[in-house]
Amino acid sequence: MSTIANFLKEHRIDEVECLVPDMAGIARGKILPADKFIKGMKSNGLRIPEQVFVQTVTGSYPSSDDDDVTDPAASDVYLVPDQETVRIVPWYEERTAQVICDAYYFDHRPVGISSRQVLINVLKLYEDKGWMPIVAPELEFFLVDVNKDPDYPLEPPIGRSGRRETSRQSYGVDAVNEFDPLFEDVYDYCEAQGIDIDTLTHEAGAAQMEMNFNHGGALLLADQAFLFKRTVREAGLRHEVYATFMAKPMQGEPGSSMHIHQSILEAKSKKNIFVTKGGKDSALFQSYIGGLQRYLPAAMPLLAPNVNSYRRLMPYTDAPINLHWGFDNRTVGLRVPHSEPAARRVENRIAGADANPYLAMAASLACGYLGMTEKLKPRDPVKGSAYRLAHTLPRTLYDALSRMNGSRSLKKVLGESFVDAVSLVKDTELVAYQEVISSWEREHLLLNV
């Protein structure tokens, strides 16, 4: 903890943001003076209600009558800052630091329904096997005009040319340059925070972008993706533009994904266990894919966590509809890119950009872990378009939750109480969604039925 105190002193920090990701991946926590933060850090005094971890995306809480996941008294838990995550917040004039925290009960048990803790628990399973996951996320997002009335559809923003995009600009360099000042801020902010971003490209949608991250440890990259979302939204606001990671924000445009490249190293030798000494696909690689194929449908509430998420998973929209796999095939759910043997990996293309990065990575790694420990075998790889094959992914959040609750193996790896918490939160959100009457219903049903 002295390392954090030294950081604050060295950078003359006035305020500290204590951050915890909630189930939706939203930054919750507290902002407090640096001296009070240091005092609280030493005495378990950085406290928040445990119920933060079952807060819905609308900001409400499940009915206490149904909640046997958290303390019914809404008791506090205490936060322990992870000293590896302390960073400057580069967009404030006042000297401010941010640090990601883990939550503990007062008997010093970690809070198992915390999304960051879920990933830590999955990584411990790998550690016990002598394995080390390496991941590299790719995050897509849209830039849109400021939208003050949610009843109005979104529009692409006006760039330097003074015009909106109206045609597809996949990989368009000049189309990205329309928003150069915004992305200059994004790169500067990320550099100041140690967020190791790599390639920026224009995707298929109007003002839709993708940012790739350099590969690294799963917890490190989840932390970076969590902070990156906040960073891009902040940069957008400073240029009077919204940056949205909503899975399907605009009708007629493709959705936004969070592709997760993943490989597994032997912890001691740092050799990729997905390949044999001769450079061929290993049995563990095959089993990892087999685990993804068997268990990812049950993990969908973590990969496609919102009612809007399932609008993205449609054929011929740059999104998968099933869990077939193939070599360098972008129509499948599980793509194996061409690579050198040491970089052999599988790309999970199922997760939406709206997913909590901790939970999306935990879910994918949990499914692969089950495949390797159960020695599962994958189906044969697909050649050609996987869109000609059946749509086997869940089509709604209702279906996804049913599959999750029916998977004993996945519940055991992720934690029974955590899966119960997911069901509790998502059921509450679904009830709230069902109360909303959409403009489509008013347009087509009001006077016609």
Image (cartoon, grey):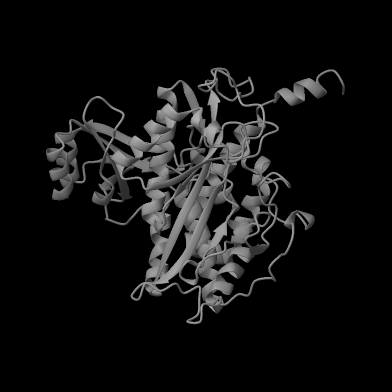
Q: What is the quadrant of the C terminus in the image?
A: top right
**Residue 10 placed where, x, y %?**
12, 40
**Residue 119 placed where, x, y %?**
42, 56
Q: Identify the residue at the far bottom of this view.
A: 278
Instruction: Give the residue at x 31% y 57%.
Output: 109
Instruction: Give the residue at x 68% y 51%.
Output: 394
Q: Identify the residue at the far front of this view.
A: 174
- Camera-side residue: 316 or 401? 316
- Camera-side residue: 299 or 68? 299
Q: Is residue 81 visible?
A: yes
**Residue 26 placed where, x, y %?**
43, 38
**Residue 83 placed where, x, y %?**
23, 50
Instruction: Give the residue at x 28% y 47%.
Output: 85
- Camera-side residue: 355 or 445? 355
Image quadrant assignment for residue 167: top right
The reply, left or right, for residue 127 in relation to residue 407 is left
- Camera-side residue: 288 or 150? 288
Relative to residue 22, is residue 90 depicted above or below?
above
